[in-house]
């Protein structure tokens, strides 16, 4: 698992290879309030943290005071009639997600339990 912290000015700080505990420390150790306060400039983006699993699945967390916004991007292989392979992109978004639920989603992502992660994001 690798990760990054996206800043308001579109720059990113690479976090390298991460353990789950290090990812949580990076999420809680970053000053999101100060970073959001600088988004009054013209061209900005929402600051957030991204985690990329070895299979390319992405979990993007945008910490907000009213609850986190989380995007989960997963590519799943499906077979039609048991013969024809097809790769489907499955994108899920959840809003207002509590810190405790966010931790559960991150844990699920680290386990590569993508269907579970998707369900947790959608149900939050």
Image: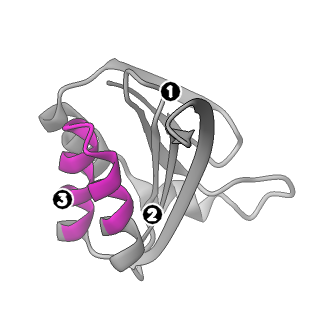
At mark 1, the secondary structure is strand
- The residue singled out by tag 2 in the image is 33
Please tell me how crowded label 2 is: few (under 14), some (14-19), or many (20+) other residues with Cα within 10 Å.
Answer: few
Residue nearest the viewer, comparing 71 with 119: 119
Quadrant (top left/top right/bottom left/bottom right) for the C terminus: bottom left
Q: Residue at x 18, y 47 (%)?
A: 107
Residue nearest the viewer, comparing 11 with 71: 71
Please tell me how crowded label 3 is: few (under 14), some (14-19), or many (20+) other residues with Cα within 10 Å.
Answer: some
Q: Residue at x 18, y 27 (%)?
A: 19
Q: Main secondary structure of the magenta part?
A: helix
Quadrant (top left/top right/bottom left/bottom right) for the N terminus: top left
Q: Is residue 36 magenta-colored?
A: no
Q: Is residue 58 above or below residue 67?
A: above
Residue 79 in the image, given as x and y percentages of width and height: 53, 38
The mark nearer the N terminus, 1 or 2, is: 1
Please tell me how crowded label 1 is: few (under 14), some (14-19), or many (20+) other residues with Cα within 10 Å.
Answer: few
- The residue singled out by tag 1 in the image is 13
Which portion, as a residue range, is magenta? Answer: 101-119
Left or right? Give the position of 56 relative to 121: right
At mark 3, the secondary structure is helix
Q: Which label belongs to residue 104?
A: 3
What is the tally of numbered marks visible in this picture?
3
């Amino acid at each position: 698992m690798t990760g990054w912290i996206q800043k308001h000015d579109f720059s990113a700080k690479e976090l390298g290879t991460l353990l789950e505990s290090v990812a949580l420390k990076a999420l809680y150790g970053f000053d999101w309030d100060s970073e959001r306060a600088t988004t009054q400039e013209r061209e900005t983006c929402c600051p957030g943290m991204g985690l990329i699993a070895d299979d390319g699945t992405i979990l993007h967390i945008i910490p907000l005071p009213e609850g986190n916004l989380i995007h989960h991007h997963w590519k799943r292989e499906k077979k039609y009639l048991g013969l024809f392979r097809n790769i489907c992109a499955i994108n899920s978004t959840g809003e207002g997600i509590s810190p405790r639920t966010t931790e559960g989603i991150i844990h699920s992502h680290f386990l590569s339990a993508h269907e579970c992660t998707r369900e947790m994001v959608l149900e939050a």
